[in-house]
Image: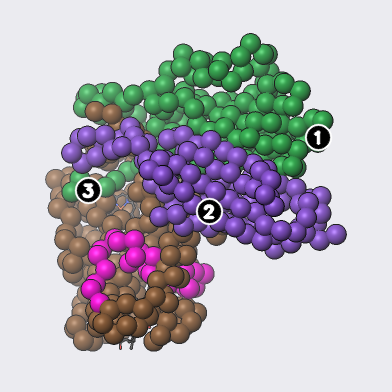
Amino acid sequence: MGHALVNVPASVKRGDAFEIKALIAHPMETGFRPGPNGVLLPRNIIQRFTCTYNGVEVFSLTLSPAIAANPYIAFFTVATESGSLTLRWTGDKDFMAEETVPITVTA
Amino acid sequence: MIGWPPFGLAARILCACCVLVAPLAVAQDTARRSGYQDMGRSLQAMQDDDMANPAMLWVQEGAALWTRRAGSADKSCADCHGDVGGMAGVAARYPAFAAGLGRPVDLEQRINLCRTDKQKADALADESRELLALAAYVARQSRGRPIAPPDDARLQPFIAAGDALYRRRQGQLNLSCAQCHDDNAGRKLGGATIPQAHPTGYPIYRLEWQGLGSLKRRLRNCLVGMRAEAYGYDAPEYVALELFLLSRARGMTLESPAVRP
Amino acid sequence: MIDTSPETTRRAFLVCSTGSAAALALGVAPAQATPESLDAAIKAVVGTARLRAGKVTLDLPPLVENGNTVPMTVSVDSPMTESDHVTAIHVFNEKNPQPHVMSATLGPRAGKAKVSVRIKLNDSQKVVAIAQTSAGEFWTASADVIVTLAACVEDPT
């Protein structure tokens, strides 16, 4: 568990907004679905996603059981300075995954 | 019973009743079409963008497995095969004849032969995450290439067997594959467009499965839809059907790993 | 924003209606949010403020091929400056077991108020997006989505 694919452009011009696309392997079990024995499968979802840019939070998302399995999240942030973006997913059953990607900002 | 999200039972019944109430006239396209062309724009976009295609999660895992040593031979795929780039074109010509076995094997079975014979490790389970990841990683190297079944005389009897299976009526609904995929392709079955059944994108991320699956799993789903007994995973019928479908799709572009509804 | 090609419209009309009949025959009664619980969930976010249509674009396929994974993009017309930006984007639905779908928190550093995710929709229904601005305004857009059933699904074994 906890493997993710994160995509950001190789380099961005200072002041430009760029898109971050993230996919993570996760079942997003809703808690409303019966298993083979008819008993509801316990809920197992990612509840929260955050993105920090050089330590400052620039985006966050609260998820629900209505988010599809293997969640895809795409959003924007403005290029301020070179450094790194840290994406973090946390959820049920102490789920926690983190990915850090470098970002190069040009003048 | 609380069924959310999908409606397994209802959908299975739907499969039957919509056939029986003979569907709707849509001019039949004589040209070969990939299932890709029957999808809406947003699903096509999901397949086309590697950063958005969820199957790429398995490809990424396959890349890690490619270099991981396994079995008593303590060898990785890469130890023998080198860079995965050498696998370009391989998936486009499977199933292929395995001389040692005297019968054809599909890509997943070929990978498992390397697991057991070369790595001296246990075979990976059918539809396991690892096997699908390796198959997706290998198949990804052939994306964009034309499907090119080998011109191997030893395959002919198996292709012929697949052809016969494809045309044979079976199951409680007394349907053949051909009745849906040749005679009614392009028409609607429930919400789904009946595709021409060209296996252009396997393994696929099927939204219905919320995960990756093999062509075999897809065929099993159709057999269940026909109310026919699905063969066991090892059954030669699947490889025969796969061979026939691939020969029928010769020259079409491989999209692996594709997205399908 | 919404694809209304003849192809999709035609497909929308061809949706087989026996699915719900089969569900009824089997006594399937899925837990569902209701228009009331949708209203309550929206009220919890908007409070007594005015909710105005506009500024928000909710992009969903009008005809969903499989409700398990429905691509959705919400974008808001906003300069995203320090003094005038979107602070949150919320999405709700009418018929899933719970009305809440997602809430995004953003600010001027987003540069662009646009978020894409994939959602689950267990039936044809209305989806509502609400954007909250730094001025304390609430803007909304909604979309009606037709969810079709997949054919030939999994074996029961």
On the question of residue B168 being in view, the answer is yes
Q: Which residues are magenta?
A: B121-149
Question: Foreground: B188 or A85?
Answer: A85
Task: Identify the amino acid type marked 3.
Answer: Asp
Quadrant in which the N terminus of chain C is drawn? top right
The chain displayed brown equals B
Crowding near the residue tagged with mark 2, few <14, some 14–19, many ≥20 C-alpha atoms within 10 Å? some
Question: Foreground: B42 or A6?
Answer: A6
Dot 2 and dot 1 residues touching (CB under 8 Å): no
Residue linked to disc 3: C155
The chain displayed purple equals A
Residue linked to disc 2: A98
Query: Does label 3 lie on the same chain as label 2?
Result: no
| Left or right: residue B57 compared with residue B7 | right
Question: Foreground: C57 or C17?
Answer: C57
Kindly state the secondary structure of the residue where label 1 is placed.
Answer: loop
Whether A77 is drawn above or below C98: the answer is below
Residue linked to disc 1: C82
